[in-house]
């Protein structure tokens, strides 16, 4: 357990943050890229291969006070943004980050280039899922699971924050 009271896997793997944006935002990154976001629910796809695995990465994303390194840091430090759920995937033999990115682009609106500068073939790692309703959150999560489970050797778990 950790300060959130949630058991998060320490293994390397992939994760998806379900994020609520509560007002229209313009996010400007260190490199000067500007991303216009409308209010609603977003899914952010990430990978965690370093020390501490998925747990370390998600706990970092939950902190508001941090050095901004990745595009997602500029979003998660914004007071109008809340991480409402997180999904984790371990035991994955394929590049689930790119698979989810390319397949979600057919179901949800990609925020072009957000978080995917290291993977130019991915349309984005941030997707607009719809209005800020519980139904939107559930549909977004269901879409992600359908894609991920089709690609995984062993499904893991989901937890809500």
Image: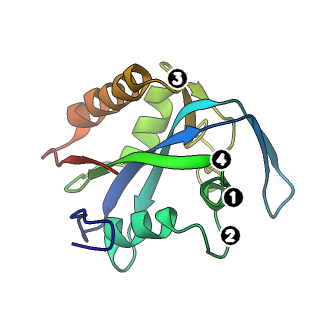
Is tag 3's residue or tag 2's residue first in the polypeptide sequence? 2
Q: What percent of the width, then of the height, locates residue 111? A: 66, 35
- In the image: residue 118, left or right of residue 161: right
Give the number of the mark in front: 3 or 1: 1
* Labels 2 and 1 touching (C-beta < 8 A): yes
Is tag 4's residue or tag 1's residue first in the polypeptide sequence? 1
Q: CA distance from mark 3 to mark 2?
A: 26 Å
Residue occupied by mark 1: 74
Q: CA distance from mark 2 to mark 4?
A: 17 Å
Is tag 3's residue or tag 1's residue first in the polypeptide sequence? 1
Q: What percent of the width, then of the height, locates residue 130? A: 54, 22
Residue occupied by mark 3: 108
Way the structure is coloured: rainbow
| Quadrant holding the N terminus | bottom left
Residue occupied by mark 4: 80
Looking at the rendered structure, the secondary structure element under dot 4 is loop
* Labels 4 and 1 touching (C-beta < 8 A): no
Compared to 75, does 106 lie above or below?
above
Residue occupied by mark 2: 68
Q: Residue at x 20, y 42 (%)?
A: 152
Q: Residue at x 63, y 61 (%)?
A: 73
Looking at the rendered structure, the secondary structure element under dot 1 is helix
How packed mark 4 is, by other alpha carbons closer than 10 Å (few <14, some 14-19, many 20 or more), is: some
Q: CA distance from mark 2 to mark 1?
A: 6 Å
Q: What percent of the width, then of the height, locates residue 124? A: 60, 39
């Amino acid at each position: 357990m950790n300060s959130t009271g949630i058991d998060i896997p320490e293994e390397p793997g992939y994760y998806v943050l379900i994020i609520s944006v509560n007002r229209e935002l313009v996010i400007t990154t260190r490199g000067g890229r500007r991303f216009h976001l409308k209010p609603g629910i977003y899914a952010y796809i990430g990978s965690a291969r370093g020390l501490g695995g998925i747990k370390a990465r998600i706990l970092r994303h939950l902190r508001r006070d941090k050095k901004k390194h990745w595009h997602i840091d500029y979003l998660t430090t914004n007071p109008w943004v809340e991480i409402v759920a997180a999904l984790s995937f371990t035991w994955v033999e394929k590049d689930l980050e790119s698979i989810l990115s390319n397949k979600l682009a057919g179901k949800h609106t990609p925020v072009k280039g957000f978080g995917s500068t290291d993977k130019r073939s991915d349309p984005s790692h941030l997707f607009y899922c719809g209005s800020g309703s519980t139904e939107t959150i559930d549909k977004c999560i269901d879409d992600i699971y359908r894609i991920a489970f089709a690609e995984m050797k062993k499904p893991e778990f989901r937890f809500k924050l």
